[in-house]
């Protein structure tokens, strides 16, 4: 049997010969900056100096960028350095001199010179940010990442790509194809694409002047629809592709004619009030920029306005006539150039030119930004609370999947990212917005039934926290210098609207929660309703759902945590409660919360500063040494007064915050958020679990007759009780022990899904799956510190290789990483950047010559940290091991090994769980129609290029962003051949999405047994991971 500790890993790394220490690369960079980009001497020196500071990182990471060659790695590094110089140096200059000198150095120019496209740039940028972060922080200050705006730029780019596709689709619904020419008597040839470009430029003018630079997707969509309305009444009628009497498009009519705005709102789920405001701003821009005189449409006689209700419409003469179109286009082009010349960002005009080299194929999501608007990830399956069926899981009523909008006329719409966002926004607009912006009478009864009336406290806290999340003025200078003043005003209005939506949602869910808690505890809910952390978590979750609805760019998760003063671990206490108690929550928002929970479990709760470590130190005292040495503990939660001072909050007539009781009194009840930092064994935080606050170990011993009593959720206040308090559910455990046990069970469930997916891709046996799963559980229970500051997938990948070696299986790390790159949750940083603290590694007998902390690749981590730590556990799993004989930790090991002794009486290592049944499901009550998932590993083998047109696979539309209903129609037409009569259409209305979701079907290969197309022996490719 091979010794895992002596495993030779060289074959898993591409061999790269680097002949210099970076000096030659630095010389090439200086020449590149001067010759390709014509940088001035000062900027060139700054860029070259920064390159010199980071060249050792380039040399050390050549193999992990692009195709692994020094030439390509240099091109990436050149682009990263120049982007940083443009964004960070101009922010540091108090005067505008630097901006003038660097005019023309834009991201587009940088990428074209480096021969990179947008997708490639944003795919590799996160790795540079992680590696060069300390250097950039020293040079440009601790807020360098906010100045760089890399995440905002990435998300903004994704939105623009989506919006450009959406704009082209809706444009072609009303006008002839953009490639068509229409004959005219004019000597000037006007193409439809000119009108298409005019609309996009007017939309960009709206973004630059009236919106802030990084605007949310819903607001931008309203902007596009307003531009569409302007085009409809101004583009010459011969270019039209619609009939004004088409009832399917223009459903809102009156005696005066078609109500254009109401019809567009009905068609695209936009708000009529918002659309009217946006179109007014667009009209003002036409008047200001193009110097056109606005006229009331009711006073104009033109063919374009025939059969339209002209009340409220504005018409501009000579706006899009052939004689003036090209000159107006030129004016809009010049205005865009003038307004954006100094920001150094992408030229947003390129997004309507699909042939532009910067838009070459590739996933813009890049695995670095939560791109829920671009692709579906594991959604239902990878959420541990949903992946494994449990009698304790909350049931959802069928009504909960109707988005809270009964009998919606648009129940079946095109499943594009934009239409999904607009449908979710409609729920917020029609279900939440009409609610009162104060506690309901029912909620007031609960608030006044506490030991004292806390209504005013709850109202004031909500106003302060939501003001911090949605500030009245933009954070930083978000508006382009010289733009119209309406941008700031619109941002303030937008923030106020979002605050109200979050506030109303908070009060609504809080009232439902109190009603459920009262059924268990009675009407006096003082312990829960006076808990500061609980309310902040509820407010953060409400705000996050509002932000997710509008698809904001500047408030990407976890920004909401930073502004409320809570941690990711705190938020996990209320996520499932929101899903449970807000039944009208749209499916997209349920998916968002499931995705957040997955992110929390896989990495965020393991990061430094997570309150999970405060509870873990109480539940596992032996770990407190490592936790304190690494500085992992969460800081005390900021007080409400401190947050109020930061945002200059005005009480507005509300009473001041009541004086806080003595720390001892407060700590005994809720945990004092203002108390000084204590030793880890005294910290107050504890994980809140959605289902049970009894230990999974003891819970498994309960008789089935007790299960019914467990179906009701336990008191929510248990989640926020002091960690050292006895668990109200009994069993003799503290709340910290129970919370950590439940948290570990969630990690194990998520690990099971990830392991199953990799086993399927690698075509491994069920025995290997069991061994990997067993090893993962043992590491979590006995070597918990291996998870600290790391991603759980890093541990899973190492488990696969370790089990393969101990089992003498011919499986290389190259194959493991190659197949992991195909997983939906894959991020390149997972295997490229693993945290290591060498002081811990030295205590395990390795790396005696290295000190400090750094990030290394996963292969080095496996050899130098993972194997020295878990070698005894691997030996037990091997052919001669004891794993099959006993699933409990031997007492001898508990006494002799410090780490194994961390968890005396650890849970019994469970066999691999039963994952959801993915056998064919009947999807119609009236038709014999079944859906059976197709493994994507089989898809490539089954569907060749010659036969692909005969198949339609879930998740792979016949056209980009086409609705499922259109796909099914195309399938039916092909199956029916020449038949002219279709007897009936498929009806999915009666299906409970909890039974089979589209994400579960699309990703079903990861949990289904059986053979698949082999991937063994595949070389480690360096192209982008599948996404």
Image (cartoon, rainbow, N blue to C red):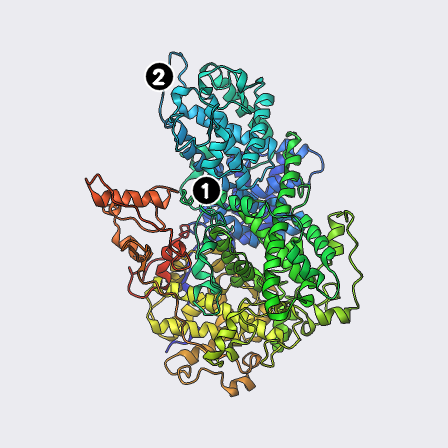
Question: According to the image, label 2 marks what residue?
Answer: 183
The answer to whether any part of residue 685 appears in the image is yes
Which residue is pictured at 61% across the width and 41% down the height?
A: 87
Horizontal side, residue 953 vs residue 846: left or right: left
Left or right side of 656 for 224: left
Residue at 54%, 49% (x, y): give it. 548
Figure check: 962 above or below 291: below
Q: Nearer the viewer, mark 1 or mark 2?
A: 1
Residue 702 in percent (x, y) is at 49, 80
Give how far across and how far down residue 61 sits, in percent.
Answer: 50, 54
Crowding at dot 2, Cα within 10 Å, few <14 / some 14-19 / many 20+, comes out as few
Q: Quadrant of residue 336?
A: top right
Q: Which residue is mark 1?
A: 419
Considering only vertical position in the picture, is 103 above or below 898? Answer: above
Q: Return the residue nearer the eye: 1010 or 339.
A: 1010
Residue 863 is at least partly visible in this image = no
């Amino acid at each position: 049997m091979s010794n895992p500790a002596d495993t030779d890993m060289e074959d898993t790394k591409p061999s790269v010969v680097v002949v210099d220490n970076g000096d030659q690369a630095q010389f090439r960079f200086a020449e590149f900056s001067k010759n390709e980009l014509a940088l001035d001497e000062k900027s060139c020196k700054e860029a070259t100096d920064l390159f010199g500071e980071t060249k050792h990182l380039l040399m050390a990471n050549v193999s992990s960028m692009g195709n692994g060659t020094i030439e390509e790695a240099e091109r990436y590094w050149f682009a990263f350095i120049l982007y940083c110089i443009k964004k960070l140096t101009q922010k540091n200059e108090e005067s505008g001199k630097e901006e003038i000198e660097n005019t023309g150095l834009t991201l587009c120019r940088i990428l074209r010179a480096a021969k990179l496209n947008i997708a490639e740039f944003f795919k590799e940028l996160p790795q540079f940010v992680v590696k060069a972060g300390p250097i950039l922080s020293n040079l440009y200050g601790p807020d360098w990442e906010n100045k760089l705006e890399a995440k905002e730029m990435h998300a903004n780019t994704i939105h623009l790509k989506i919006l450009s596709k959406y704009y082209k689709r809706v444009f072609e619904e009303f006008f002839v194809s953009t490639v068509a020419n229409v004959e005219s008597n004019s000597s000037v040839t006007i193409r439809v694409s000119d009108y298409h470009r005019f609309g996009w430029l007017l939309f960009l003018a709206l973004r630059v002047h009236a919106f802030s630079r990084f605007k949310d997707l819903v607001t931008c969509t309203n902007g596009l629809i307003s531009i569409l309305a302007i085009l409809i009444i101004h583009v010459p009628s011969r270019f039209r592709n619609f009939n004004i009497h088409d009832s399917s498009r223009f459903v809102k009519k009156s005696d005066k004619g078609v109500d254009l705005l109401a019809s567009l709102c009905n068609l695209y789920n936009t708000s009529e009030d918002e659309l009217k405001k946006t179109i007014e701003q667009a009209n003002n821009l036409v008047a200001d920029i193009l110097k056109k005189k606005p006229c009331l449409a009711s006073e104009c006689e033109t063919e374009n306005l025939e059969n339209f209700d002209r009340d409220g419409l504005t018409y501009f003469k000579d706006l899009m006539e052939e004689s003036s179109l090209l000159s107006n286009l030129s004016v809009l082009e010049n205005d865009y150039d003038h307004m954006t010349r100094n920001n150094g960002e992408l030229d947003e005009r390129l997004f309507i030119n699909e042939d532009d080299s910067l838009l070459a194929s590739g996933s813009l999501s890049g695995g670095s930004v939560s791109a829920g608007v671009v692709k579906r990830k594991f959604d239902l399956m990878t959420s541990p609370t949903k992946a494994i069926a449990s009698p304790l899981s909350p049931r959802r009523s069928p009504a909960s999947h109707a988005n809270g909008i009964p009998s919606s006329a648009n129940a079946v719409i095109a499943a594009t990212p934009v239409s999904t966002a607009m449908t979710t926004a409609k729920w917020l607009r029609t279900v939440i917005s009409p609610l009162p912006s104060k506690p309901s009478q029912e909620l007031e009864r609960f608030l006044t039934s506490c030991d004292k009336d806390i209504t005013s406290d709850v109202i004031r806290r909500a106003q302060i926290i939501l003001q911090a999340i949605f500030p009245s003025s933009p954070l930083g200078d978000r508006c382009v210098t010289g733009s119209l003043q309406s941008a700031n005003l619109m941002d303030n209005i937008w923030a106020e609207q979002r605050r109200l939506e979050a506030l109303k949602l908070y009060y609504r869910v809080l009232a439902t929660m109190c009603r459920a808690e009262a059924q268990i505890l009675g009407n006096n809910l003082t312990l829960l309703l006076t808990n500061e952390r609980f309310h902040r978590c509820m407010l953060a979750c409400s705000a996050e759902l509002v932000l997710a609805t509008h698809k904001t760019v500047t408030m990407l998760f976890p920004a909401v945590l930073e502004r409320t003063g809570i941690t990711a671990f705190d938020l996990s206490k209320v996520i499932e409660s929101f899903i449970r108690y807000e039944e009208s929550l749209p499916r997209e928002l349920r998916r968002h919360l499931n995705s957040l929970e997955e992110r929390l479990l896989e990495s965020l709760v393991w990061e430094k500063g997570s309150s999970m470590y405060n509870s873990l130190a109480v539940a596992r005292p032996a770990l407190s040494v490592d936790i304190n040495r690494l500085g992992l503990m969460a800081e005390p939660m900021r007080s409400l007064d401190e947050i109020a001072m930061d945002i200059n909050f005005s009480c507005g007539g509300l009473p001041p915050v009541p004086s806080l009781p003595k720390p001892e009194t407060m700590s005994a009840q809720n945990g004092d958020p203002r108390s000084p930092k204590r030793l880890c064994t005294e910290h107050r935080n504890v994980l809140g679990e959605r289902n049970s606050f009894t230990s999974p170990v003891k819970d498994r011993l309960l008789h089935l007759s007790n299960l019914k009593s467990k179906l009701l959720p336990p008191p929510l206040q248990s989640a926020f009780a002091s960690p050292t308090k006895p668990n109200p559910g009994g069993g003799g455990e503290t709340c910290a022990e129970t919370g950590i046990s439940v948290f570990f069970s969630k990690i194990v469930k998520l690990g099971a899904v990830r392991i199953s997916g990799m086993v399927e891709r690698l075509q491994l046996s069920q025995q290997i799956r069991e061994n990997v799963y067993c090893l993962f559980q043992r590491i979590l229970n006995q070597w918990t510190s291996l998870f600290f500051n790391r991603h759980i997938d890093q541990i899973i990948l190492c488990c696969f290789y370790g089990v393969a070696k101990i089992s003498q299986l011919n499986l290389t790390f190259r194959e493991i990483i190659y197949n992991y790159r195909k997983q939906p949750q894959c991020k390149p940083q997972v295997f490229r950047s693993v945290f290591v603290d060498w002081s811990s590694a030295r205590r395990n007998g390795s790396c005696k010559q290295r000190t400090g902390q750094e990030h290394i690749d996963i292969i080095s981590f496996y050899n130098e940290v993972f194997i020295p730590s878990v070698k005894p556990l691997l030996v037990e799993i091997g052919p001669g091991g004891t794993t099959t004989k006993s699933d409990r930790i031997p007492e001898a090991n508990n006494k002799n090994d410090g780490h194994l002794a961390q968890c005396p009486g650890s849970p019994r290592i469970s066999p691999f769980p039963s994952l959801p049944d993915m056998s064919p499901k009947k999807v119609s009550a009236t038709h014999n129609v079944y859906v059976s998932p197709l493994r994507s590993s089989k898809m490539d083998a089954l569907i060749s290029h010659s036969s692909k047109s005969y198949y339609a696979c879930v998740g792979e539309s016949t056209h980009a962003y086409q609705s499922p209903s259109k796909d099914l129609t195309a399938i039916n037409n092909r199956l029916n051949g020449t038949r002219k009569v279709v007897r009936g259409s498929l009806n999915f209305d009666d299906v409970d999405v909890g039974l089979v979701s589209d994400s579960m079907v699309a990703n079903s290969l990861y949990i289904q047994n059986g053979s698949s197309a082999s991937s063994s022996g595949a070389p480690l490719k360096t192209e982008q991971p599948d996404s």
